Image: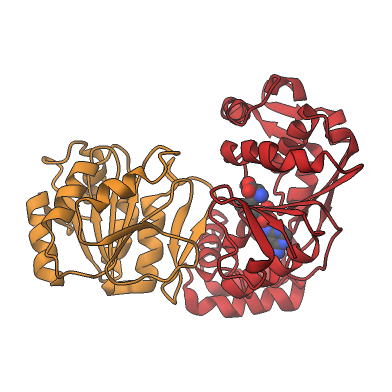
Amino acid sequence: MIDFGDLDEIVFLIQKIYGYDFSDYSRASLLRRINRFMENSKVRSVFDLKYELVNNQGTFNKFVNEIVVNVSDFFRDPSFFKSLTTNVFPYLESYPSINIWSAGCSFGEETYSLAILLKEFELLHKSRLYATDISSNAIEKAKKGIYSNKNFKEYSGNYFACGGKESFNEYFISDKNNFIVNSDLKKNILFTRHNLVTDGVFKECQLVLCRNVLIYFNEDLQDKVLNLLYDSLPINGFLALGSKESLRFSSVGDKFMEIDKTERIYKKIR
Amino acid sequence: MIVIGGSAGAFQTLLSILEGMDKKIRIPIVLVLHRLKDQGSLLEKHIQLMTHYKVKEAEDKEFVKEGFLYTAPPGYHLLLEEDRSFSLDSSEMVNYSRPSIDVTFESFSRVLKEKCCGILLSGSNHDGAKGLKKIADNGGKTIVQDPDEAEFAVMPKAAIEIYKKHDVVTSNNIIKRLNYGFS
Ligand SMILES: C[S@@+](CC[C@H](N)C(=O)[O-])C[C@H]1O[C@@H](n2cnc3c(N)ncnc32)[C@H](O)[C@@H]1O
């Protein structure tokens, strides 16, 4: 087990050797994830941890996967997706082509959920979805689009709760253990690595989703990333945050209008 | 800070404890209850009727203040930063729960050490037991609702099983402990 006092050294080490900058991440969460990692991989002391991180790229990769929290669901917060289809989709319809950015897409659940709804609203054919994450492991898995059947029922329930018109089944091929995303759903999606902390604007997009990513950052970094998201939007572009994230402390707060307060959907107005 | 955890059968006990607390007490209270998603702010409204504290859901990076009772939002673990602001975390469930009582107890105890008082009420799973022991290990005060009184004894029993020295008392005595210790 490590404590707050050990964090700086570990963060510094990672930055120096691998270039990842975790210095403005939530320290409470970092500490919890690192201790979880140490427990699961039987690393006992700070000394051992540092040794492993420096000398073993494999351990480092596992370490990063653990601390960035690649946890997601299909249609996480159905009420959010429902609001998106009623409050945002009608505006998107007016564009000849639509760019959407799903930042911090994890294993792709959020992106595929969105693609399904776009398809049902006949918008997918003219949409391009850019889905990015810091974690290369997550991006590789997202591209494959293979998920465990364990959660299928819950996801299917979510799908109906957010107003799905068809059957959730339809978008996948299943075997005994897994369900796999159909290739025509994947056609308009580009999964690629992008680090919100160190990389710049990815692409101008009329809709940007960045959900349950900011909570892992301290206030300064939240503000920095919100500025990046702001710069990625045209006037009248939409920003969607996680259900417990907001523009409250942000310097771009007054440049957005609330579209749905509870579902944290905003529109850039200046 | 007082951190209270509970699950099935804890709600009425919680209300009577809050109602019985001396109105002079203003030490921040944090509440982690297992509950079903999507009840809106019903729980907070209900609790507000019974306490002199201002009741609100904990928000990400919000600073903890005296006189407030904060609830952990459904679907997120609740953590405490060194500067005493909250962080929310949407990672894996722990003990089939999110928020998990263990996660919050452990995180708060790490920051607050002996200034963290943990209370564990009725419930039908093992969440909270490990975390409560961490609070005790860090020098904080720990109180467990008497399993004989609790509607569901599994949770208090689990805590006592892994650590014998918790203060195990009925809800009336929990009130007395709080009024004696914090006013
Ligand atoms: C909890 S998941 C959220 C997934 C999804 N958006 C949702 O709401 O369910 C957080 C994601 O943010 C990613 N992430 C963390 N730091 C990042 C960074 N600096 N740049 C890009 N993505 C990051 C993690 O790898 C993880 O996949």
On screen, residue B116 versus residue B93, left or right, reads: left
Chain B pictured colour = orange
Chain A pictured colour = red
Colour mode of the rendering: by chain
**Residue occupying the far right of the picture:** A96
Q: Which residue is drawn at 71% across and 44% down?
A: A107
On screen, residue A195 versus residue A162, left or right, reads: right
- Name above or below for residue B41 compared with residue B107: above
- Name above or below for residue A192 compared with residue A155: below
Ligand 1 is in which quadrant of the figure? bottom right
Q: Quadrant of the N terminus of chain B?
A: bottom left
> Viewer-proximal residue, B112 or B71?
B71
Q: Which residue is drawn at 57% across and 56% down?
A: A41
- Residue A8 on image: x %, y %: 58, 79
Q: Which residue is drawn at 20% across and 61% down?
A: B52
On screen, residue A114 versus residue A7, left or right, reads: right
Residue A70 visible in the snapshot = no
Report how many numbered discs are placed on residues in the image: 0
- Name above or below for residue A270 compared with residue A120: below
- Residue A215 on image: x %, y %: 57, 61
Residue B182 visible in the snapshot = yes
- Residue A158 on image: x %, y %: 59, 31
Q: In which quarter of the image is residue A81?
A: top right
> Viewer-proximal residue, B168 or A38?
B168
Q: Quadrant of residue B117?
A: bottom left
- Residue A200 on image: x %, y %: 82, 68
Q: Quadrant of the C terminus of chain B?
A: bottom left
Q: Residue at x 56, y 51 (%)?
A: A261
> Viewer-proximal residue, A151 or A167?
A167
> Viewer-proximal residue, B18 or A246?
A246
Q: In which quarter of the image is residue A225?
A: bottom right
